[in-house]
Image (cartoon, grey):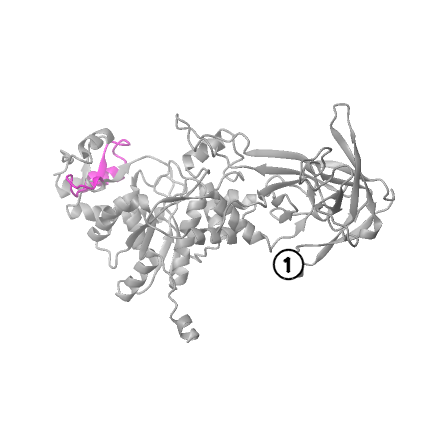
Amino acid sequence: MEENVMEKEVVSKNFIEQIIEKDLEDGCYDHIQTRFPPEPNGYLHIGHAKSILLNYGLAQKYHGKFNLRFDDTNPTKEKTEFVHSIIEDAKWLGADWEDRLFFASDYFEQMYEAAVKLIQKGKAYVCDLSADEIKQYRGTLTEPGKNSPYRERTVEENLELFENMKNGMYKDGEKVLRAKIDMASPNINMRDPVIYRVARMTHHNTGDKWCIYPMYDFAHPIEDAIEKVTHSICTLEFEDHRPLYDWVVNELEYPNPPKQIEFAKLYLTDVVTGKRYIKKLVEDGIVDGWDDPRLVSVAALRRRGFTPESIRNFVELVGVSKANSSVDYAMLEYCIREDLKLKVPRMMAVLDPIKLVIDNYPEDVTEQIEAPNNQEKEDMGSRTLPFGRELYIEREDFMEEPPKKYFRMFPGNVVRLMYAYIVTCTGCEKDEAGNVTVVHCTYDSQTKGGNAREGQKVKGTIHWVSVKDAVEAKVRLYENIIDEEKGKLNEDGTLNLNLNSLRVLEKCYLEPNLAHAEKLMKYQFVRNGYFCVDSKDSTEDALVLNRIVSLKSSFKL
């Protein structure tokens, strides 16, 4: 009986999967084809990661094909640098498009021919109105627009004028080609939208071949149709553009035209995703490029130490819906903790060091202490740690006059040095200003491995690094770049920045097993969090590590 129940268990499907399966059942399409179509005008961010993984995942699930296509129809903002970064990010996330890498600019000739076809059908005309005049003629949400005085030009005149546009006979903005639809439509996008403009711009892919460029709303459905995309999946801001999308593919008479489906964007609290904001942060030198670890561009997340698996798990947890909502950044942190906790070794690192001297330990002796690499993952094995008379411990692990329930070092208290010995704190040294400079203790030689004597209760355990063998490193600690309490934007529209978003600790000490840590290697530092060797600034002689995330989570699944 139990087996039958399991066999009949229904797997929950999101609304896009339900649409796709119905289309397959109804014979609308005999295959599934999706695409991710970024404009190469910046780096991808966490929201784009959701779109990539959604589109690629659907192609995989329904044994279809997936394209990566650059919507490069606006040369003023596009750079080859962004093309390369997007390709790298998409590959890192796990998307595989095989040989299916395309550019909208590859189709400029076909788009021009499509525009000619619309003119020939009486569905497009050349208009001489300026951009401001077109806006005035468009009307409002409550009032219909009015026809352009150039709307009734003959097919022959429009064909000639459009060819003249292509041949560079007009100044930028002097003439445009508009679709001839309905100036009284309740959807403003359908009120004779501009589909081509004159613009003398050098294109990263086609150079100076063209001086006219198609508008996005005209180009995008053509690109999808040419590539035989079946489901054009985009975010909700394009919902009002769907009638125009359908009008283009229907008027151009593409067989089995693609279907546009909109889903909710991924909004993450207390982060910056807007390209214009990030661009300003970069240009003003507030952040270290588009991959600054305080950002949530895919490149920044990779540099900070996030893994593709953690991003995929995050996107899966967020899910796909039709309603816009914000996701707490803590969920993203939860996903990286869950992914790393059984993957990476747990090492010792002291970020705010103070010296600990074990007064009764031999001065010239160094012994090797065995420590597990990950207490939750036995098959990760163990390592040895040099132990001697002088150690570094965290400054916060000693207090002369501790509060109640403080179980670390204070005069007379007994604590465990992790994996090593039980020690008793005997006091400290101070400088002239009264600051503690050295802590003193004695050790019990019969407690090697940190094993207390019978009946002995030790409540506190602290980590340490041997002074003589320590590896010096620079460590960066991050907070959200936006001030969480005051909101994302100031009254003047500028970003409300958190001035403490980056804290650099110059002299941190790591166990010697980290001496040759390579770029992007990840570790858990006991009690301090998860860290990653910086991919840009770290060198063999000067380690730099970024904290990926602290150990403590405020998010509950």
Q: Is residue 317 left or right of residue 429?
A: left
Q: Residue 32 appears at what percent x and percent y?
A: 34, 61
Magenta stretch holds residue 174: yes
- Front position in the image: 461 or 382: 461
Which quadrant holds residue 29? bottom left
Residue at x-position 78% and y-position 47%: 422
- Image check: 532 left or right of 212? right
408 in magenta: no
Residue ID at (31%, 38%): 211
Is 490 placed left or right of 323 in the picture? Answer: right
- Percent of width and height locating residue 174: 24, 31
- Residue placed farthest to the top in the image? 432
What is the three-letter code of the residue carrying label 1? Lys
Residue 243 location (% of width, % of height)? 23, 47
Q: Kindly identify the residue that appears in the image at 33 percent across and 56 percent down.
A: 16
Q: The residue tagged with tag 1: helix, strand or loop?
A: loop
Q: Nearer the viewer, residue 432 or 477?
A: 432
Q: What residue would you read off at disc 1?
A: 377
Q: Residues within 10 Å of mark 1 (few under 14, many from 20)?
A: some
Residue 46 lies, with reference to residue 435, above or below; the image says: below
Residue 49 image offset from top left, x and y in percent:
44, 48
Residue 24, compared with residue 436, is above or below; it is below
In this figure, what is the number of numbered marks?
A: 1
Residue 46 visible somewhere in the drawing: yes
Q: Which range is magenta?
A: 159-188
Please state, as top left, top right, bottom left or bottom right, where the N terminus lies in the image. Answer: bottom left
Query: Seen in the image, is 171 located left or right of residue 156?
Result: right
The quadrant in which residue 354 appears is top right
Q: Where 308 falls versus 397 (above or below)?
A: below
